[in-house]
Image: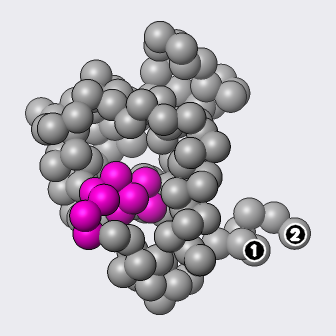
Amino acid sequence: MGSRDDALDEQEFEQLLDACDPKKPRERLVILLAGDLGMREGEIAHLRRSWINFQRGQVIIPSKDENWTPKTKWGARTIPAMKMSPRAWDAIKAYFTTYEGMDAHRVTIYRTVDRVAS
């Protein structure tokens, strides 16, 4: 059984987004980063404003950053906004206009998804 077997269908993903607390924008952002962009827990936890190129519409996951190294050499990559849903890019812009980074542990990201899903 692989991760594709565990993937949510579109309706399940929409239900998960609907379950996010509107008073907690980070919850919705975490779900969109994982579901729309395919980002891993560790990448989400370490995501910084400096990883986002607002002019080009990209999330750039670096090969090395302060307290961050990707799990594999393929982890460093660029995610273009055109491959994202508009709501994911809008959530990124809204969150990182206010905050510098996620400033979380990967377990916190896991628990966020688990809490929203339950």
Percent position of residue 36, x then y? 43, 61
Percent position of residue 51, x then y? 33, 27
The foreground one among 78 and 11 is: 11
Q: Answer with left or right where residue 95 lies relative to residue 6.
A: left
**In contact (CB < 8 Å): disc 1 and disc 2:** yes
Image quarter of the N terminus: bottom right
Alpha carbon distance from label 1 to label 2: 6 Å
Residue 29 magenta-drawn?
yes
Q: Answer with left or right where residue 47 lies relative to residue 5.
A: left
Circle 2 — which element? Answer: loop
Please give the name of the residue rendered at 53% of the width and 27% of the height, measured from the top-left corner.
76
Q: Which residue is mark 1?
A: 5
Q: Quadrant of residue 5?
A: bottom right
The foreground one among 48 and 54 is: 48
Q: Amino acid at mark 1?
A: Asp
Percent position of residue 20, x then y? 38, 71
Coloring applied to the structure: one colour
Q: Is residue 77 visible?
A: no
Residue 12 magenta-drawn?
no
Residue 48: image tag: none
Q: Amino acid at mark 2?
A: Met
Q: Which residues are magenta?
A: 22-31
Q: Answer with left or right where residue 51 lies relative to residue 103.
A: left
The foreground one among 80 and 110 is: 110
Please give the name of the residue rendered at 54% of the width and 14% of the height, measured from the top-left corner.
67
Image quarter of the C terminus: bottom right
Q: Which residue is mark 2?
A: 1
Q: Answer with left or right where residue 65 lies relative to residue 91.
A: right
